[in-house]
């Protein structure tokens, strides 16, 4: 998304480091979806605490809805069928086809959904 919009910030890859495995390997919300939410914040999030954030919330709700509809869920543990919070689960994960079969498509779904939403003109209020 940053490449698409010409955003160059050295800090962004570091911020997203622990998204994998459902937020730091906990099996929670898929890191691809979390990344899409981060992209929404980067592109249209508030710049000052007093600003309203209705558009960012609306876009986030829609990207979540689209992701869940296409992937069948939003939780890493549900999507992968694996427990990435344990070393043996991580080992099993990398020895399987799950990264290719589930995670790669999840990244594509999240990217496509967020880009469609961010490239659409804002709805008038």
Image: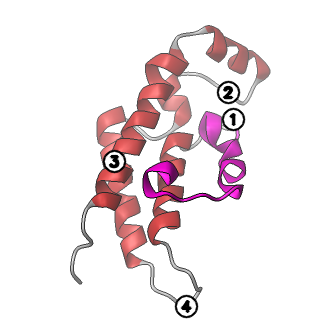
Say which element carries label 1: loop
Magenta span contains residue 44: no
Residue 25 is labelled as: 1
Question: In this orientation, which residue lies closer to the viewer: 53 or 8?
Answer: 8
| Secondary structure predominantly adopted by residues drawn in magenta | helix
Residue at the spot of label 4? 50
Residues shaded magenta? 1-25
Q: Residue furthest top?
A: 95
For the residues labelled 3 and 4, the Cα–Cα distance comes to 28 Å
Magenta span contains residue 7: yes
- Identify the residue at image location x=63%, y=34%: 21
For the residues labelled 4 and 2, the Cα–Cα distance comes to 38 Å
Residue at the spot of label 3? 113
Q: Residues within 10 Å of mark 2 (few under 14, many from 20)?
A: many
Q: Residue furthest left?
A: 124
Say which element carries label 2: loop
In which quadrant of the rendered image does the C terminus lie? bottom left
- Residues at discs 2 and 1 in contact (Cβ within 8 Å): yes
- Residues at discs 4 and 1 in contact (Cβ within 8 Å): no
Q: Quadrant of residue 58?
A: bottom left
């Amino acid at each position: 998304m940053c490449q698409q919009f010409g955003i160059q910030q050295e800090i962004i890859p570091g911020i997203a480091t622990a998204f994998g495995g459902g937020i730091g390997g906990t099996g929670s919300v898929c890191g691809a979806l979390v990344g899409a939410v981060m992209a929404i914040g980067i592109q249209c999030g508030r710049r000052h605490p007093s600003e309203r954030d209705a558009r960012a919330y609306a876009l986030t709700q829609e990207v979540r809805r689209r992701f869940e509809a296409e992937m069948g869920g939003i939780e890493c543990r549900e999507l992968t069928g694996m427990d990435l919070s344990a070393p043996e689960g991580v080992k099993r994960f990398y020895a399987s086809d799950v990264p290719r079969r589930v995670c790669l498509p999840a990244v594509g779904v999240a990217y496509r959904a967020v880009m469609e939403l961010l490239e659409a003109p804002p709805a008038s209020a």
